[in-house]
Image (tube, rainbow, N blue to C red):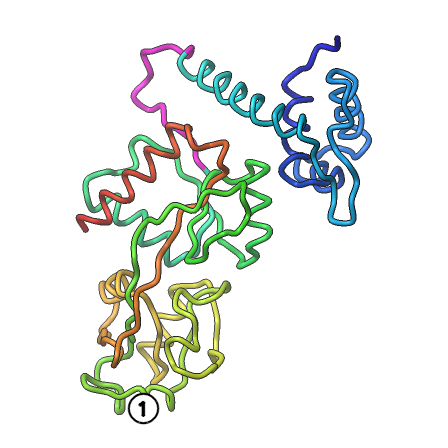
Amino acid sequence: MHTLNMGTISIFLMVMDTRSVTNAAALLETSIPSVSRAINKMRETFNNPLFIRTKNGLEPTSLALTIASNLTRAVEHVELAIKVSKPYAKKLNDRASLRLSLSPVLEFYVTSTLQKNGRCLEQFELTCETHDGDLLRDINQLRSRRIDLSLTPQRHSDSSIVNEPLFDITPRVICRTGHPRIKPGFTMEELRNEEYLSYNLWPSLIEDNVLLGVYKPPIYSSNSMLNLLVMTTTSDYILLCAEQFAAGFAQFADVQILPLPNEKPTGTIYAHYHKNRSNDINITTLINKLKQDITHS
């Protein structure tokens, strides 16, 4: 009987997630032969092929599914044991490190809300990277633990990713004070005649055709809050934005925030993380803080 180490088990679980030796190697930043050797070792240990090659990728056998379920729980127990085995007395400046992926506007809203409600991020050391709009890349980064948590308005369909609702969003129109056409009581037809800005690189929080009734691409997209805010306040361009984020813009510029006529249902911001991290106390604590602080903001 072969002795399995954590490296071999991690490779096996990644192949289970990706159904591909090549993709598993890329996500783990190791070589394809290394992944193949680990899988062969697992096959010899359990005397089972574990994966059957099909046109859609590697299909796990029933034994592989059972093994994966058991090993996943085992890995979670090992990780928990490591955490509780650390010294109980921590230094005051010890903080849990978490890497997040989200849009700049959402980053500003989340961090400022945490701070405003008296939770000055004292428990966490958060590192944020800009979400580039590639949802498949987002899933792969969550699988490979390159990021711990991502926040987007889209639900991920991948079965290995948890989609946890954080808060609902309501669409608003932002434009400069004194705009010659857009003012309280404006109609959807007037809005459709305006040129608008899009504030992120990935799909809008509220789909364009939902907001405007017809598909109308934005004249400018950026992940820079500053550029979009300046363009909104110095021109007749309008900005389509969620109500919560619009309030953040209004702190820095003289803008008016107006509701849409015949307002559509709200959308939702989701927190995404790998299902194997469901018992990660740092992730669940941060999500609960966000839910509590956003509710009371």
The N terminus: image quadrant = top right
- Determine whether 217 is above or below 160 in the image: below
- In the image, which residues are magenta? 85-98
- Horizontal and vertical percent for residue 15? 68, 35
Residue drawn at the location 23% of the way across and 76% of the way down: 258
- Horizontal and vertical percent for residue 243? 26, 65
- Horizontal and vertical percent for residue 23? 71, 42
- Horizontal and vertical percent for residue 250? 23, 67
Q: Secondary structure of the magenta portion, mostly?
A: loop
Residue 173 figure quarter: bottom left
Say left or right for 176 vs 42. Answer: left
Disc 1 marks a residue whose amino acid type is Glu
* Badge 1 element: helix
- Residue farthest to the right, as pictured: 33
Q: Nearer the viewer, residue 223 or 242?
A: 242
Was residue 86 drawn as part of the magenta stretch in this picture? yes
Was residue 153 drawn as part of the magenta stretch in this picture? no
Say left or right for 180 vs 275. Answer: left
Q: Determine which residue is flagged by label 1.
A: 190
Q: Nearer the viewer, residue 212 or 108?
A: 212
Residue drawn at the location 33% of the way across and 91% of the way down: 189
Residue drawn at the location 74% of the way across and 40% of the way down: 58
Residue 282 figure quarter: top left
Question: How many marks on residues?
Answer: 1
Residue drawn at the location 37% of the way across and 59% of the way down: 105
**Category of crowding for the residue at label 1, using alpha-carbon neighbours closer than 10 angstroms: few (below 14), some (14–19), many (at least 20):** few
- Determine whether 79 is above or below 297 in the image: above
